[in-house]
Image (spheres, grey):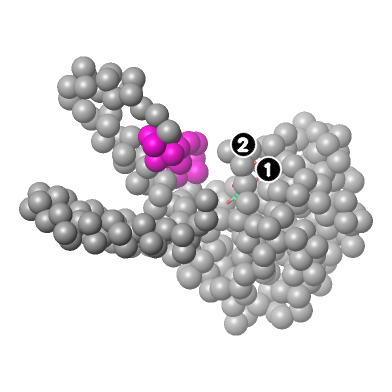
């Protein structure tokens, strides 16, 4: 099958590497000539160009640009697509994509492969990135069933865990497990930074170890990622932040009132709850 990929970075490049291994012909479009050249050298694409006309031959196109340029890209792209082409995206937020991008193409399927690394760009692309990871599809009542089946047939051999849900359910779920943790972790760092006693602050820096490494990691990462979450998943993130603030207030109250029994019950419940999310 002729597959198109627009945006040859970590996700687009990794998809290209795997889809070529599976025998597909992969055509790539990216913003920079240098990226196109590197994508060919790295084996992520068979052909690459900065010109969206290359997508004329594609039967399925994966939109893998950052969210911030997706709408402009899709507007430029659709005049070059054959009427039967299926367009799918990999954006980390789905409500915004289904409201803003999907209306530009009737054969559109919203998608989110939930895999990644801390790096970005074509050099970060790697084979088997998606193995055993969830790949969420968010078809709506308007999404043609045949288009969903075509995308599924392409991504299932990547050995992903296929998940179907509503765009809003996806966004609230990722707010809890990804976007809220970034804001909590960043606010932890910001609160530490505000310590007015410089001697204490320096001592804390000298004593920081594995616990602080774990809890500060996602908040101390690329600011652009946090901005993307806040700007494109505002409603779900704000809802989670308010719920978190209320929960934090309960913790503060239990500790201030020295209600150790209540605090112990809460900590017992969180200890039992964690393995239902993640196993060490
Ligand atoms: P990335 O590594 O920065 O790659 C994005 C690529 O898009 C860049 O290499 C850039 O190529 C290209 N690009 C930028 N503007 C473009 C334009 N106007 N036209 C064509 N190509 C353009 O980012 P990524 O991590 O792969 O993320 C891409 C998408 O995947 C985002 O929508 C993100 O939400 C989603 N996603 C990311 C992750 C993750 O963990 N990173 C996980 C799941 C989904 P040039 O080098 O040519 O400028």
Span of residues in magenta: 211-227
Q: Are marks 1 and 2 in contact (CB under 8 Å)?
A: yes
Which label was assigned to residue 47?
Answer: none
Side of 181 relative to 25 (left or right): left
Alpha-carbon span between mark 1 and mark 2: 7 Å
The residue drawn where x is 62% and y is 69% is 163
Residue 267, by quadrant, is: bottom left
Q: Who comes first in sequence, dot 1 or dot 2?
A: 1
- In the image, is the residue at mark 1 within 8 Å of ligand 1 by its beta carbon? yes
Does the stretch in magenta take in 213? yes
* Residue placed under numbered mark 2 in the picture: 119
Which label was assigned to residue 10?
Answer: 1
Does the stretch in magenta take in 196? no
Side of 215 relative to 75 (left or right): left
Mark 2 nearby-residue class (10 Å; few <14, some 14–19, many ≥20): few
The percent coordinates of residue 243 (x first, y second) are: 28, 61
Q: Secondary structure at mark 2?
A: loop
Q: Is residue 141 above or below residue 229?
A: below
Mark 1 nearby-residue class (10 Å; few <14, some 14–19, many ≥20): many
The percent coordinates of residue 227 (x first, y second) are: 44, 45
Side of 92 relative to 237 (left or right): right
The percent coordinates of residue 2 (x first, y second) are: 88, 59
Q: Is residue 11 above or below residue 104?
A: above
Q: Is residue 64 visible?
A: yes
- In the image, is the residue at mark 2 within 8 Å of ligand 1 by its beta carbon? yes
* Residue closer to the observer: 39 or 165: 165
The secondary structure that most of the magenta stretch takes on is helix
Question: How many numbered callouts?
Answer: 2
Image-quarter location of ligand 1: top right
């Amino acid at each position: 099958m002729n597959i198109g990929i627009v945006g040859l970075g970590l996700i687009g490049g990794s998809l290209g590497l795997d889809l070529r291994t599976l025998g597909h012909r992969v055509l790539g479009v990216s913003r920079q000539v240098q990226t196109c050249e590197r994508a060919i050298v790295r084996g992520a694409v068979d052909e690459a160009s900065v010109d969206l006309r290359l997508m004329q031959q594609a039967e399925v196109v994966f939109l893998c640009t950052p969210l911030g340029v997706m709408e402009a890209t899709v507007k430029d792209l659709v005049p070059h697509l054959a009427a039967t082409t299926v367009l799918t995206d990999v954006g980390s937020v789905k409500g915004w994509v289904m409201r803003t991008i999907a209306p530009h193409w009737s054969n559109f399927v919203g998608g989110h492969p939930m895999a990644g690394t801390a790096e970005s760009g074509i050099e970060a692309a790697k084979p088997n990135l998606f193995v055993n990871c969830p790949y969420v599809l968010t078809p709506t009542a308007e999404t043609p069933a045949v288009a969903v089946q075509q995308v599924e047939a392409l991504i299932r051999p990547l050995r992903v865990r296929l998940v179907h849900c509503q765009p809003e359910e996806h966004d609230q779920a990722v707010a809890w497990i990804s976007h809220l943790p970034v804001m909590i972790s960043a606010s932890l760092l910001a609160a530490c930074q505000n310590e007015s006693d410089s001697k204490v602050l320096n001592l804390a820096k000298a004593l920081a170890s594995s616990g602080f490494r774990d809890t500060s990691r996602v908040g101390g990462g690329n600011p652009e990622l946090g901005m993307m979450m806040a700007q494109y998943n505002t409603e779900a993130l704000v809802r989670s932040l308010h719920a978190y603030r209320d929960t934090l207030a309960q913790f503060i109250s239990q500790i201030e009132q020295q209600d150790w029994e209540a605090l112990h019950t809460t900590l017992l419940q969180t200890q039992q709850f964690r393995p239902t999310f993640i196993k060490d």
